[in-house]
């Protein structure tokens, strides 16, 4: 097949395996045929091209014929004449064709001899004999594409070949024909009276014919496709939008990628033309119904469509039957109809005339309004009123929809409706605007900013609050003016604009008198405490916080009291790591829960989880995180800042504990639902990728986090990943530069560097020490001295940040472990490997970081070997290898094996038993492998994605030293990892 593709075949492993088995059976003399069905664009041609390419490379003769849409004027035998033309042009095959003159005459058109029954039979028999003889010379793969366009003659010939010709089984013990036929057709083109339908029904009953339906790609597979067809990295939000719109169709996805960055957000013109061709095949009445349905949306009720289109019932039903028959509409539950694909609806809608569009929207708005003011139709009514140019009605419906979204915990939808209301505000005369308390432009902006913050759109929250501030006049109520300012301060903290936040919180506190005490003053004070702490003014934060707590208790402003308790738990004594701090946080959680303030409750839960983590009690942090994420889900706040931090911390804990597969699975699940601002939360999965040798992919994803406005957390996690990637590559210069860039970006306005600087310094020091050691080995003393100086500089940075963190106190076990590693690398760079300092680093990471402890143990083993403590070195190497195998950390495994070989530490260090190296989840996957399950089937049975299943399979192969799935199962049985009884029971 001449067609080639520049992108890898994605998501078709199971289908390719099935077709490959058919091809192997044909090579052995069992002729087979497969009818490949799928919607237009789903990837039939791409898959058949892959199979044909593999077949050709293995010595199979591949012959391809295409059916073409020529309308009512079809060319007889078109796909077969294409095949015979290729045979005639091939000097190896032409003599075989010459021996079958009846078939050869087909190349001359449709001779008179084949117009009578006898002539057609001779033609069919000659063609069957030709394929039989061709398959005697070499196995043959016949590919026929687009059967839905096949002419009647071609359909008749195909029926003969499959039912009476070359697929007939051999008799008398002789081998059959070495032929496989793969024929594709568009399932969505087969309307009820399509002439191919009866032929398909007849063929699939034949024993040698099977049907294969290509399903739409899974979302994760479309995302892989999107990233593979675009050279430049696309933002996660863009990828998610393309995946959502493509709905599993590979062609649609590629067209949407090609249109990325162009003006407009509709359907790309080329794709729209393809989609509209099928619409234009309908009758005028059916097209009218389809256009009306497109205005309603993706789905429409039968009664609503009937009233909007204004057709008699019989005419409407006939038109709907036509649209359903052409598979443009799909009948659903509760008397509804929906477009088979969302992009088809978009294309039809985009083809409407402006006046036609406004008229139909107006009709739907009036029909929905006539059903009564149901809250669940408010969003629809707002949309239709807006598109029909009725701003007053659209404003009222938008506010109603925003209230409904707020009540059901949907902040993103609430924000969308409030922004629509704000856009409409000036277009509606004051007398026609909704009346009531809190319905003014400034208050709406504050509501919208809160919704934006809860939806994870921090920068949008700042913009809306600034707009509210600009709308506050000189004569505005002082409480409203103060509320706008402390709201703006809180939002500015969310985007790390800390000095500005402190200034606005100061203004807010000055605008409201402390006496008589008021809830507004308490909240202004609570916000000022946060801002003061962020800029390092702890004295002010403590003074204002203690006073405000007393006022909150007196006024019984319970949620503000809870918020202040969280702040003071971090400020006083030993902070959230101490028992006293955690007791305060627990009290704050209970107060916030009683007050029904979910954001403050989430803040308390987050700090409880972080306090446990910073104390080195990693397992203890997990229940707090689970409770926090569940509370966020129930409150509709999963995309707000603290739940985002909790998602990140959850993955950090899983990564640190060495539960890498669970970390990757959770990251995949999170990535599917996160807003663009939450991309940083999946960073621990990047650390897994780095540790498993996927340096380029991890670095690309880390750099993508830095696109867009500055984000403190995204900068932090990207800095860690990029520093480690550079160090793993041995690029000391790049690693050091990345540390400096990241620390500079994260240093706050008071000049205090980030706590993460100790980790960054330690990571870069690994490459710096390697460079220093290499320089000494080659006798380059200048370079050795320069790298030693850089090592001292980085170690000093690590000591400074570890011993005096952002709270002014020494960091917890994690920070001190990274300091121990940094100092051990410094010693290696300056004087050489020292077993004592590496032993200290190994001990420091015993709080729970399995991978970093193993990396330190490898250095410890190297130092022990230099010190001629060989038995101890061998023991450390064994421990490193066990951890590397368990985690699937290939590069670390390679390094320890190299050390064992180089140091001649003996077989004992390099050959642990395999029985203990598989995780529980890998054991489940291995059992399903033994049952012959595909990756997709494993994923479905274990409730994980097919991609995750593939990762587990790869890890199993690596851990067992197997080259294939079959070999892995054989090894598992041999070594007792599987037993027939356990597999059968599973």
Image: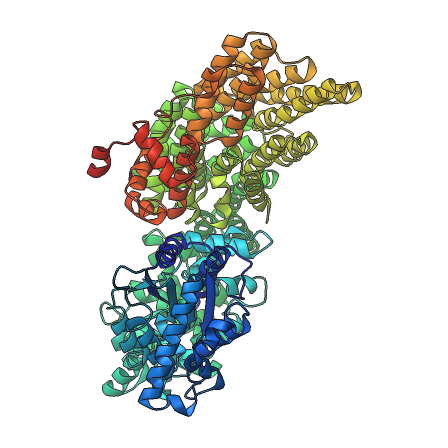
Q: Is residue 679 visible?
A: yes
Q: Position of residue 38 (x, y in %)?
A: 37, 66
Q: Position of residue 547 (x, y in %)?
A: 46, 28
Query: Closest to the observer: 447 or 958?
Result: 958
Residue at the (47%, 40%) spot, across then down: 681
- Residue 383 in sight: no
Write down the quadrant of residue 298 in the picture. bottom left
Choose between 725 and 450: the one closer to the eye: 725
Residue at position x 30%, y 78% in the image? 325
x and y, in percent, of residue 642 in the image: 43, 39
Left/right placement of residue 206 relative to residue 440 reads: left
| 490 and 240: which is toward the camera | 240
Query: Is 797 left, or right, of 342 in this rendering?
Result: right
Q: Which quadrant holds residue 348?
A: bottom left
258 versus 599 height, above or below: below
Specify the quadrant that holds the C terminus.
top left
Image quarter of residue 579: top left
Left or right of 401? Residue 450 is right
Is residue 107 placed above or below 690 in the rendered structure? Answer: below
Which of these two is toward me, 654 or 608? 654
The picture places residue 481, in percent across and down from the top left corner, at: 51, 49
């Amino acid at each position: 097949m001449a067609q080639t593709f520049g992108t890898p075949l994605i998501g078709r492993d199971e289908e390719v395996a099935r077709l490959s088995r058919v091809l192997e059976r044909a090579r052995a003399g069992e002729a087979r045929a497969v009818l490949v069905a799928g919607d237009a664009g789903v990837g039939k041609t791409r898959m058949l091209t892959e199979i044909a390419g593999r077949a050709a490379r293995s010595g199979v003769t591949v012959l391809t014929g295409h059916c073409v849409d020529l309308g009512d004027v079809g060319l007889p035998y078109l796909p077969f004449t294409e095949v015979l033309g290729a045979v005639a042009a091939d000097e190896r095959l032409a003599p075989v064709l010459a021996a079958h003159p009846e078939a050869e005459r087909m190349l001359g058109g449709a001779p008179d001899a084949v117009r009578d029954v006898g002539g057609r039979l001779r033609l069919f028999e000659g063609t069957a004999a030709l394929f039989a003889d061709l398959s005697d010379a070499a196995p043959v793969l016949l590919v026929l594409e687009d059967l839905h366009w096949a002419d009647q003659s071609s359909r008749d010939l195909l029926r003969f070949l499959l039912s009476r010709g070359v697929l007939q089984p051999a008799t008398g013990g002789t081998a059959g024909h070495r032929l496989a036929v793969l024929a594709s057709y568009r399932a969505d083109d087969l309307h009820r009276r399509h002439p191919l339908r009866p032929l398909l029904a007849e063929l699939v009953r034949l024993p040698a014919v099977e049907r294969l339906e290509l399903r739409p790609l899974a979302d994760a597979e479309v995302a892989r496709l999107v990233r593979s067809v675009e050279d430049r990295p696309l933002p996660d939000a863009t990828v998610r939008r393309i995946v959502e719109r493509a709905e599993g169709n590979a062609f649609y996805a590629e067209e949407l990628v090609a249109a990325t960055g162009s003006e407009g957000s509709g359907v790309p013109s080329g794709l729209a033309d393809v989609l509209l061709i099928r619409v234009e095949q309908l009758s005028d009445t059916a097209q009218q119904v389809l256009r009306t349905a497109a205005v309603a949306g993706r789905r429409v009720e039968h009664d609503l469509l009937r009233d909007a289109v204004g057709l008699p019932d019989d005419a409407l039903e006939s038109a709907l039957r036509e649209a359903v028959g052409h598979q443009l509409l799909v009948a659903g539950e509760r008397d509804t109809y929906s477009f088979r694909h969302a992009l088809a609806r978009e294309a039809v809608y985009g083809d409407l005339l402006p006046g036609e569009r406004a008229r139909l929207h107006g009709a739907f708005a009036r029909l929905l309004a006539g059903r009564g003011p149901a809250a669940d139709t408010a969003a629809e009514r707002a949309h239709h009123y807006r598109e029909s140019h009725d701003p007053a009605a659209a404003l009222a419906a938008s506010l109603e929809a925003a209230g409904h979204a707020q009540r059901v915990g949907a902040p993103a939808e609430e924000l969308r409706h409030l922004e629509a209301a704000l856009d409409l505000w000036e277009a509606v005369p004051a007398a026609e605007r909704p009346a009531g308390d809190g319905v003014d432009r400034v208050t709406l902006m504050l509501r919208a900013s809160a919704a934006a913050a809860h939806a994870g759109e921090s920068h949008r929250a700042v913009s809306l609050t600034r707009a509210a501030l600009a709308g506050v006049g000189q004569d505005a109520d002082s409480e409203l003016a103060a509320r706008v300012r402390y709201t703006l301060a809180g939002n500015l903290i969310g985007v790390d604009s800390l000095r500005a936040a402190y200034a606005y919180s100061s203004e807010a506190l000055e605008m409201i008198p402390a006496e008589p005490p008021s809830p507004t003053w308490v909240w202004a004070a609570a916000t000022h405490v946060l801002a003061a702490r962020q800029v390092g003014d702890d004295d002010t934060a403590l003074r204002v916080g203690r006073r405000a707590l007393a006022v909150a208790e007196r006024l019984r402003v319970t949620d503000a009291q809870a918020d202040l308790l969280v702040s003071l738990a971090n400020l006083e004594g030993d902070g959230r790591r101490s028992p006293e701090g955690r007791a305060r946080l627990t009290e704050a959680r209970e107060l916030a829960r009683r007050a029904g303030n979910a954001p403050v409750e989430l803040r308390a839960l987050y700090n409880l989880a972080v306090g446990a983590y910073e104390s080195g009690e990693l397992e203890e942090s997990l229940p707090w995180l689970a409770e926090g994420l569940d509370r966020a889900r129930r409150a509709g706040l999963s995309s707000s800042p603290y739940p985002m931090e909790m998602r990140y911390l959850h993955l950090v804990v899983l990564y640190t504990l060495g539960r890498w597969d669970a970390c990757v699975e959770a990251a995949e699940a999170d990535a599917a639902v996160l807003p663009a601002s939450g991309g940083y939360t999946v960073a621990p999965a990047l650390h897994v990728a780095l540790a498993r040798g996927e340096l380029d992919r991890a670095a690309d994803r880390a750099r993508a986090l830095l696109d867009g406005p500055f984000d403190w957390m995204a900068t932090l996690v990207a800095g860690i990943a990029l520093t480690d990637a550079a160090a793993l590559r041995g690029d000391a210069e790049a690693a050091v530069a990345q540390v400096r860039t990241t620390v500079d970006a994260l240093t706050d306005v008071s000049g205090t560097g980030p706590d993460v600087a100790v980790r960054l310094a330690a990571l870069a020091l690994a490459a710096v020490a390697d460079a220093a050691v290499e320089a000494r080995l080659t006798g380059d003393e200048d370079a050795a001295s320069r790298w030693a100086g850089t090592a001292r500089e980085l170690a000093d940075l690590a000591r400074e940040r570890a011993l005096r963190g952002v709270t002014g106190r020494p960091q917890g076990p994690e920070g001190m472990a990274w300091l121990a590693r940094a100092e051990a690398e410094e010693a290696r760079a300056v004087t050489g490997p020292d077993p004592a300092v590496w032993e200290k680093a190994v001990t420091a990471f015993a709080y729970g970081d399995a991978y970093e402890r193993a990396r330190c143990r490898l250095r410890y083993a190297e130092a022990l070997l230099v010190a001629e403590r060989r038995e101890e070195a061998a023991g450390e190497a064994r421990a490193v290898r066990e951890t590397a195998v368990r985690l699937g950390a290939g590069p670390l495994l390679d390094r320890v094996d190299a050390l064992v070989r180089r140091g001649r530490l003996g077989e004992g260090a390099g050959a642990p038993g395999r029985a203990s190296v598989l995780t529980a989840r890998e054991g489940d996957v291995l059992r399903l492998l033994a049952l012959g399950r595909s990756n997709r089937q494993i994923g479905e049975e274990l409730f994980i994605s097919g991609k995750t299943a593939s990762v587990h399979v790869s890890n199993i192969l690596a851990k067992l030293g197997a080259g294939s799935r079959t070999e892995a199962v054989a090894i598992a049985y041999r070594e007792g990892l599987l037993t027939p009884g356990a597999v059968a029971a599973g």
